[in-house]
Image (cartoon, rainbow, N blue to C red):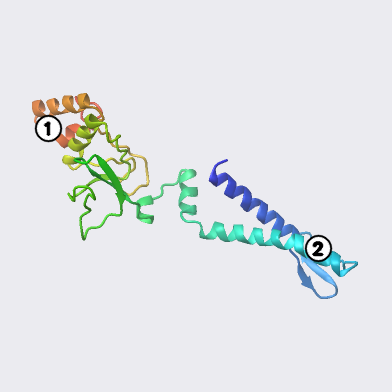
Amino acid sequence: MRAGAAFAAALLGGLVLTALFSSIPLSGGQALTMFGVVDRVDYATAAWQALALTATGPVTLWGLITIALLVTRNGWSARSASRYGDPVCFYAMTHYKLHYACVSCRVSFKRHADLQREHLCPNCSQPLLCAGHDFAPPPRRDVRSWSVVAAVLGEGLRYEGLSVCGCGKEPKYRPRTRAELRIRRAVAARDGLSLSEALSRPDPLTSPAD
């Protein structure tokens, strides 16, 4: 079961049980419950009353805790709106970490963007290149794939799957193999395009506007 479904089930169960076992004492030996105003029934002995309170107390507390979790859960409203099709600017609401890569050491790290200082590779102390929110680093032993990554990042491109503000899916094409990189370099040289534009084309022979 997904975490969202489990949370919804816990919330619903807590609300129902809280409503069932909660009552507000009124004057005249009556109480207000979800069923209306009812006569309060006294327990035969103090032992039975203690047992009932012991059983219903944790249930009521569980309901209140699930309500509190619903109110304080991070991004609940944003995820709910996104699920039902409403545009939500995820990147404006939450500062997500970015992927930073060192193509020389063939490693990547997730760091918060910091305009005051540059992130350095812990292995070679060289500046890391920002690879975007959705960079999937190749295995370190895959030298060929890392050479393609180096070409992409060297042109100032990033690996992004959402729009700039994060409110819609706009996956950006990036070459993954050396063959895809070679043909786009050839097209850029032949047609006088910038390499960054050629690397952004899913079809190297067709402009994205066409």
Task: Say above or below: 146 vs 68.
Answer: above
Give the x, y percent position of residue 150.
Answer: 19, 37
- Give the residue at mark 1: 193
CB atoms of marks 1 and 2 within 8 Å: no
Q: Residue at x 24, y 39 (%)?
A: 106
Element marked by disc 2: helix
- Give the residue at mark 2: 51
From where the camera sits, is residue 187 visible?
yes
Tag in front: 1 or 2: 2
Give the x, y percent position of residue 104.
Answer: 19, 40
- Closer to us: 128 or 130: 128
Element marked by disc 1: loop
Given the current orientation, which residue lies at the most extreme front position? Answer: 123
Q: Is residue 101 left or right of residue 162?
A: left
From where the camera sits, is residue 40 visible?
no
Give the x, y percent position of residue 117.
Answer: 20, 58
Q: Mark 1 Cα within 10 Å, few/some/many (few <14, many 20+)?
A: some
Q: Is residue 71 left or right of residue 44?
A: left
